[in-house]
Image (cartoon, rainbow, N blue to C red):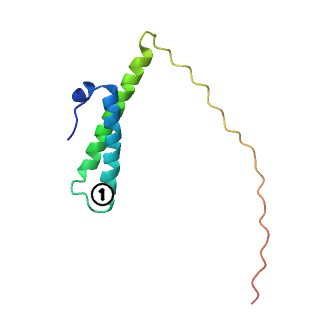
């Protein structure tokens, strides 16, 4: 039941959200059935996960397209310089001495 991205692009965003919920539920049930040894086709888990990823990707693309419509893409903000780790010397605490066992 592998879905093609081309077929998914024809669907509405609302339909994709419903499909996302059903696929997430299918992934859960397939994993549960696999753990209880009731799943015959174990490749169904990976197929369903990939279909779910396709749907999530398309939903994210729709979201990004909605945000950028009418707006120029914003330039990426420069990353701050990483902080250097401080090398403070930490005094070793001595452990309390334990009494030796009597022989």
In the picture, residue 8 is in which quadrant? top left
- Residue drawn at point x = 34 percent, y = 56 percent: 32
Work out whether residue 15 or residue 98 is closer to the camera in this orientation and state it. 15
Which residue is disc 1 drawn over?
33
Percent of width and height locating residue 94: 78, 63
- Residue drawn at point x = 22 percent, y = 35 percent: 3
Farthest-out residue, bottom: 103
Crowding near pointer 1: few (<14 within 10 Å), some, many (20+)? some
Task: Decide: is 75 above or below 28.
Answer: above
Percent of width and height locating residue 92: 76, 57
Whether residue 53 is visible here, answered yes or no, is no
Viewed as shown, does residue 21 lie left or right of 97? left
Percent of width and height locating residue 66: 41, 18
- Residue drawn at point x = 33 percent, y = 60 percent: 35
Work out whether residue 30 or residue 76 is closer to the camera in this orientation and state it. 30
Task: Decide: is 51 above or below 12.
Answer: below
Whether residue 4 is visible here, answered yes or no, is yes
- Location of the N terminus by quadrant is top left
Task: Decide: is 61 above or below 84.
Answer: above
- Location of the C terminus by quadrant is bottom right
Callout 1: helix, strand or loop?
helix
**Total numbered circles:** 1
């Amino acid at each position: 039941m592998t879905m093609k991205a081309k077929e998914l692009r024809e669907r509405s965003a609302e339909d994709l959200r419903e499909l996302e919920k059903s696929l997430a539920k299918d992934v859960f049930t397939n994993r549960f059935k696999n753990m209880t040894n009731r799943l015959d086709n174990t490749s169904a888990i990976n197929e369903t996960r990939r279909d779910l990823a396709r749907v999530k990707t398309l939903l994210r693309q729709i979201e990004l397209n909605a945000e950028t419509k009418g707006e120029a893409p914003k330039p990426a903000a420069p990353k701050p310089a990483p902080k250097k780790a401080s090398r403070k010397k930490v005094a070793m605490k001595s452990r309390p001495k334990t009494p030796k066992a009597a022989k």
